[in-house]
Image (cartoon, grey):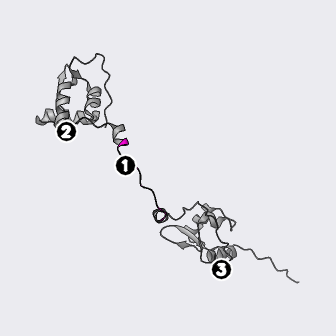
Amino acid sequence: MARGIPDHKAPAPPGFAWIDEASRLSGRSIETLYKDRAAQRRTGRSNGPWSSSIGRMAAWRKADIDAWLDSQGGPAPDAEMLHNSRPPEPRRTAQVIAASRKPPTWNQIREDVPAPGTPEGAYFHYTPAEAAEWLPFGAHKLRRLAHAREIPYVDNGNRVWFSGMNIRAISEQFTVQPFTKRRS
């Protein structure tokens, strides 16, 4: 669990820094400095700048922080400098864009979708939202009926799809035929 910044009522003695300033000067998080301090007290060695106690408070000598930074090979990393030093993002080519396209999710409706009754639409795979435009059910009910195996659907990788033939079969399945009149 991360610790918060302690509320120091008095300023740090000259040449020393409390945890928040030591974190800023060293470039290490407050939690990391506390872990380094615990390792220092437990083993006598520390991965970070050496700490000491002033009263009951943890303090770091600024000279120790500077010496530790020198031993690390330079100043603490500056987040803005690191961000600005990144190379620009590569331009995405048409092949990369086409390769990164994903199939539509269950609630997306694509453009230029052929009608289920046409030859192109017979084997076209429709999302439940697209099929709902041709059927008297909403997309959610179509998914529910498909998972209950009450209507025909295409199971393509744990997704529910409907072919044009499925849509026609569902439409016929729920078509109500008129009564014939009985002659008495």
Task: Please name which of the two marks, 3 or 1, marks the residue nearer to the observer.
Answer: 1
Q: Nearer the viewer, residue 141 or 155?
A: 155
Task: Please name which of the two marks, 2 or 3, marks the residue nearer to the observer.
Answer: 2
Tell me the distance, in whole angstroms, between the alpha carbons under discs 3 and 1: 50 Å
Give the residue displayed 25% in from the left and 28% down from the top.
22
Pointer 1 or 2: first along the chain: 2
Amino acid at circle 1: Pro
Amino acid at circle 2: Gly
Residue denoted by label 1: 87
Q: Percent from the top left, x then y, of residue 131?
A: 64, 67
Residue denoted by label 2: 73
Q: Nearer the viewer, residue 32 or 69?
A: 69
Pointer 3 or 1: first along the chain: 1
Count the marks. 3
Contact check, label 1 and label 2, Cβ < 8 Å = no
Q: How dense is the environment of label 3, judged by Cα within 10 Å: few (below 14), some, or many (20 and up)?
A: few
Q: Is residue 95 above or below residue 55?
A: below
Q: SS at mark 1? A: loop
Q: Is residue 171 above or below residue 4?
A: below
Q: Which quadrant is home to the C terminus?
A: bottom right
Residue denoted by label 3: 119
| Magenta stretch, residue numbers | 83-94
Q: Nearer the viewer, residue 167 or 68?
A: 68
> Residue 39's image quarter?
top left
Q: SS at mark 2? A: loop
Q: Percent from the top left, x then y, of residue 129?
A: 62, 63
